[in-house]
Amino acid sequence: MSENNWKTGITKVKPNELRLKGYRVDELMGNVSFGQVVYLALKGELPSENVGKIINAIFVSSIDHGVTPPSALAAMTVASTGAPLNAAVASGILAISRFHGGAIEDCMGVLLQTNEKHEFRKISIEQAATEIVDEYKQTGRRISGFGHRIHTQDPRTVKLFQLVEDLKIGGNFIKVAQTVESALTKQTGKKLPINVDGAIAAVLCELDFSPKLANAFFMIARVPGLVAHIYEEQTRQKPMRVIEPKNYEYDGPIDRSL
Amino acid sequence: MSENNWKTGITKVKPNELRLKGYRVDELMGNVSFGQVVYLALKGELPSENVGKIINAIFVSSIDHGVTPPSALAAMTVASTGAPLNAAVASGILAISRFHGGAIEDCMGVLLQTNEKHEFRKISIEQAATEIVDEYKQTGRRISGFGHRIHTQDPRTVKLFQLVEDLKIGGNFIKVAQTVESALTKQTGKKLPINVDGAIAAVLCELDFSPKLANAFFMIARVPGLVAHIYEEQTRQKPMRVIEPKNYEYDGPIDRSL
Amino acid sequence: MSENNWKTGITKVKPNELRLKGYRVDELMGNVSFGQVVYLALKGELPSENVGKIINAIFVSSIDHGVTPPSALAAMTVASTGAPLNAAVASGILAISRFHGGAIEDCMGVLLQTNEKHEFRKISIEQAATEIVDEYKQTGRRISGFGHRIHTQDPRTVKLFQLVEDLKIGGNFIKVAQTVESALTKQTGKKLPINVDGAIAAVLCELDFSPKLANAFFMIARVPGLVAHIYEEQTRQKPMRVIEPKNYEYDGPIDRSL
Amino acid sequence: MSENNWKTGITKVKPNELRLKGYRVDELMGNVSFGQVVYLALKGELPSENVGKIINAIFVSSIDHGVTPPSALAAMTVASTGAPLNAAVASGILAISRFHGGAIEDCMGVLLQTNEKHEFRKISIEQAATEIVDEYKQTGRRISGFGHRIHTQDPRTVKLFQLVEDLKIGGNFIKVAQTVESALTKQTGKKLPINVDGAIAAVLCELDFSPKLANAFFMIARVPGLVAHIYEEQTRQKPMRVIEPKNYEYDGPIDRSL
């Protein structure tokens, strides 16, 4: 058995020196944003400050969605049994799966396929989008990232697209997403607006992330929200209570603005 | 069974309106940092920009520590079986426990007890620290947050304390931590410098977080690092390989500076 | 770094030969019961057939308790997001914690302490039990394993104790448990009958298992039940449904007997 | 919102009465084997005693395979951080995935397809098996359940097939599996004997279980083995040790027979 039989390209650890993708971690601290460092860890290069800002905005957009998502319910349920914080977080993470969070990855696939048709076959985005929504319909697949159980116009989508413009991130995939939205409206006769998952998908395509990493952005964003729900369960509720997912009311701070 | 039989104070969800602790999430996006929003989610109020910066610095400090921590090994091991990303992350999260990450919570306890002695009994921090390290020794407990297997002078500690000063966060608990360090040196006759866990503990005490939330900061910070290792396992390695935790070498980007 | 720097005493793997605690696994197959092999794995020796039968009875007793325990809810919640079977099982396992399943371990502690008082101080079991329930009351701790939200006379307790007698397992800890039950009744003025957790605790004490392994018996028993709920969720329900833990009804096979 | 808006067909809970698929749990205890009750929970009917015996034999066959499988390593790694038993078990469960344990499900697919070809197209099993191995080769897929890293003649396969014969379970799918083995030998020119996963697959096909439940059998079987490794880690090893998956030796009981 030889020494050093496998390789890793992420972090180099030496006594009193810790480097992530070549950069000293202590140099990164305070000088670049968390969003930039996450990008660095996953893609190997430090992005511009503006790219860091859009990633931070993605994290903020998805930090929490109340007590009804399965990730929050799974985390609270485990917390109610007296489990430690990390076990409850892990349970929440296990619920961030195909139908919860998974829409980002699925939607990235749709947007990438649409753009590929457009680029390689030199057809308009409109035509490419129409073909894609038809193909999905014919094969009985649902196009993820459009429509929402609760929000008809997701304010997070509006803001994320505005930030992409303000920060000059490049909006090709925003256009692709909006064109798919139009094609869906034409096909179905009803409005299925881009939801926050679809909006994040468009931004992650723009930033050239692999769809296989899409779920990571949702998980990184949501862990603090899960922690908040777990801590609330631990400090406000009795162990082993029956958690009824509809019979609750909000009693937190009243509406306010920055 | 009555309606609305339990309460939550974190997030309010209405059609086209999502509010975290009273603030519209779309208003938070792009306007405040991820660190500020995590603080908001966990403590209920938006902190200053500087507090957000120190929290971001904590996240950056702990984003990864290479392939040897148990959280990375557990995550990679699960990834090597073909499990999905979130399952591998959950496994890593389950390893962030008493002896890995847990030092932050334990150290916060030490610092809070020391400060309490100092304030309530009106004795000097030096005397309080000496008493605490003696009490721990007598009861056979280890004081966490000091000393490191690899780093004799953790560069992340130095930087974090520098940022606390630069950002005017208030340094009472930094002083407490440094005084405990001195007391430990006197007691043991050897240098046990504050490590990154101890440094984070001091900052979280300063920000008045409950020790019960300490582990959350480590988890939020480390999820991106876990994702990076999982993705590397999925894309560079064969399934079911034997992961030998010592026989690896780093082949990532060479040393570089901002 | 030397070869073979750690040891394991459980399973020996050679080409075409697999031995658990010294016995060929293929020889164990078909010749001894699962309960006996679990005992072998955890304690290192093959127990009598009757001990195997009582362990099997423990597993059967705790295989399921419907859809309301947190382990079932956590597992179903994760399953509803499209997660794979093992992720949903893992989530259920994470809910088998201090307040759900944990009663077995806690109760074993009570029974062992009572018996120790009885044996070492040569006082009657009655006196020892009275002292223990008083000590718990004075320190504000609850005695686990007695009383049940739903069952006033748990039929599983009755049967398990009957089997202990029929199989001649030895009933010292059954007597201890029954004496603690009496002491609790005297102290509180109400009937707090031994529940299935308390009954299992008594049997595991009798079999000389460490309380640290108590939870293992509950987990081994409950995994099939979790699988049944997950599979039902996957095959009968729509993804992402809201699981209301009270608003269900049973529509399985009607009451029947062996 | 109406009452009772969903249904479950597994367990009925009434005060002092607990029924699994219609049978009183206390009546099942001591009267039927754990294997029979698992079958009852998953398929809704009590099987014969012999079917219970073959299921018990499956559980015994897969209870453990030493310290090198990823499930054992993930569980031990998490245990080494001071995590509770159930968190370490959950981590091990998360490693029972596509490439570890998943072979049973994949192999069931192969056997069911082969048998379907044989029955519906009225061709011989030999011809059906030859077509299947050819189809898999042409589409670049691996046929799971044949060959083993360590065992050239898996003793557990031999014993399981012997038990199927002795217990008169019905051997159609054993024959299918053996015919696929022959076809693979012809195709590849090398011996790829049915391994324990393939053998279990054949038995589960014979018992008419859905392939979607295959992994459940492996998990139920392996939880006790995981517990044994976790408990060994907790009681024999120091926290946070580096677990080198090759450098260990077995120091348990010496070879012995029933």
Image (tube, coloured by chain):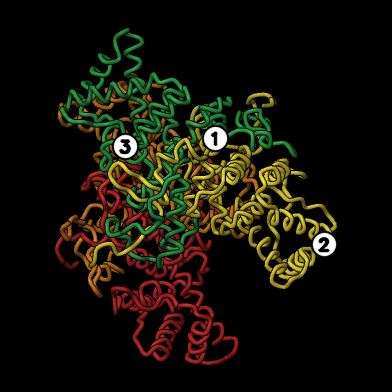
Chain colours: A yellow, B green, C orange, D red
Front in this rendered view, residue A206 or B238: A206
Query: Who's the residue at 39% across and 18% down the image?
Result: B172
Given residues D14 and D229, the one toward you in this image is D229
Amino acid type at image mark 1: His
Q: Earlier in the sequence, mark 2 or mark 1?
A: 2
**Which labelled disc corresponds to residue A187?**
2
Farthest residue toward the top? B122
Give the letter of the chain under mark 3: B
For label 3, the residue is B154
What residue is rendered at 54% in x and 55% in y?
A213
Crowd rating for badge 1 (residues with CA inside 10 Å; few <14, some 14–19, many 20+): many
Dot 1 corresponds to which residue?
A229
Report if the CB atoms under discs 2 and 1 are less than 8 Å apart.
no
Q: B120 and B8: which one is in front? A: B120
Report the amino acid beneath label 2: Gln
Asked if labels 3 and 1 touch by Cβ distance under 8 angstroms, the answer is no
